[in-house]
Amino acid sequence: MRRVVSLFLPNWSTDRIVRKLRQQPDRSARSAASPAPSPAPAPLVTALPDHGRRVVASVDAAARALGIRSGMTLTQARGFAPDLLVIDGDPEEDFQGLKRLALWATRHYSPVAAPDPPDGIWIDITGCAERFGGEVPLIKHLYRRVLASGLNAQIAVADTAGCAHAVARQVPSGRPTIIEPGKARTALAILPVHALRLGPGVADELRRMGFERVEQLMAAARAPLAKRFGLQLHKRLDQALGHLPEPIKPIFAADVPRARRSLLEPIGTAEAFAHVIGDLTTDLAALLLRAGLGARHLDLYFERVDGHWQAIRVGTAKPSRDPAHLAKLLCQKIDTIEPGMGVEAMTLVSPLTEPLAGAQADALAARRGPDLPALIDALANRFGARQLYQATARPSSMPEREIDLVPPLGRAALEGWDAALPRPSRMILPPEKVEVTAMLPDHPPAMFVWRGKRYRVARADGPERLHGEWWQSEGQEVDTPLSVRDYFQVETADGGRYWIYRLGDGTQRATGPMSWYIHGAFA
């Protein structure tokens, strides 16, 4: 099921200008007749020339609250706010800003994003939500990032671009609006007709004819309306309902390495995709070699005959320009593509690259010995990069803090663990309390009960005494800074090997209540 985000920026022009001036306080871009913008909440508008007069092009929230609207002359607008701040509008710079915002979205959320001028962008998040743990966390993350940048935003998610666009602009809920899959028709029904992105004057004429809401258009006969308004009216309605495709053409940065193959005939099989992927990775590797770069991210776009774009994204643990390796990573995700009536072009882009010096393998096209980065790439693209990590030692006397998790190819600690003091392969966090029977209070356990099951101890080794890190500001040491643990390695009669400790040394109450805990299990 396709899922599209519409990010609507109601004050895009004024928000962009305010952000720019705050970043460059000495640079004045305002008109000569206007005072300098300041953090004070004075109403702000942009203006454009129109037939010998200047009209309001966009307004900020303060100006809108006073009743100032786009299309007013500046004379009318100053009637609402005599201290109105006026800055010359720049539609081209507004559009370039939307392109930069869409490129930012391609790096963080989805390979398919595009500007939706004059005040929004599209993001096709189909298949991208898993990286964030679901669609809701993705949308919340996007919403928080946009608000934190100083932009006013409204976000909607729906099955179609038209439905998301309409809801984002007509439902100012103050939080992201998510239309559940299959509910686009219900969501559109109650919206006004001008939410369908109709041509100038069409919505006004429809209202004069008695069409106020979209549901009335859905129920009306099509032929008379098509004869009067043309095919565009029902095209927009069908696109919003999902009856007609509305492709989102992704945007690419101009300077990123890119390879494209247009196909003589549409293809739709995995074998055909794999063959083209091999050609594309070879072409891209040649570009990267000439530039002295290696790919860290790859986006592969499939352009279907119906205009719909789909994409898959893979990453590499280290910069790479090995065509066979890159092709193998991409081919693992071919089954996520829905070819529909066929794919007529494929484009491979590397949006993230890093310098990579020439290697002998580039010339010989051969690789010797184990290739750990290739293994990590294969696992990361199959199970997710966040599922892979490397355990390394961290200086601490408490076992639960002796392990640090770093990226698979990250730098490990110079000093490892003490081989004379083995630690269990499976740690139980937090430690679970057990009932222990011992011959004497300071003897090793003879029997213990864990999770309702009784274990008879055949052998025991210990204790290994550990003192709490009293200087820590969190953890158990906050309440018991003088705690002492006596650890025992025990082997039960059925062969299980566990790590059990007694909290307290038996002489000082501050060291612990002499209770027992299980902290891990040996392999």
Image: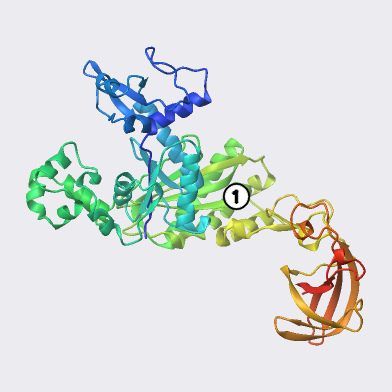
| Residue at the top extreme of this rendering | 32
- In the picture of the structure, the residue carrying the numbered disc 1 is 322
Residue 322 falls left or right of residue 42? right
Image x and y of residue 15, in percent: 42, 31
Q: Is residue 58 above or below residue 169?
A: above
Q: Is residue 362 above or below residue 117?
A: below
Label 1 Cα neighbours within 10 Å, binned few <14 / some 14-19 / many ≥20: many
Q: Residue at x 78, y 73 (%)?
A: 517
Residue 178 falls left or right of residue 430? left
Q: Residue at x 23, y 46 (%)?
A: 196
Quarter of the picture containing the C terminus is bottom right
The image's colour scheme reads rainbow
Image x and y of residue 309, in percent: 37, 50
Residue 36 falls left or right of residue 389? left
Quarter of the picture containing the N terminus is bottom left
Residue 95 appearing in the image: no
User: Between 398 and 337, which is closer to the camera in this rendering?
Assistant: 398
Image x and y of residue 150, in percent: 47, 35
Q: Quadrant of residue 96?
A: top left
Residue 319 appearing in the image: yes
| Residue at the front extreme of this rendering | 509
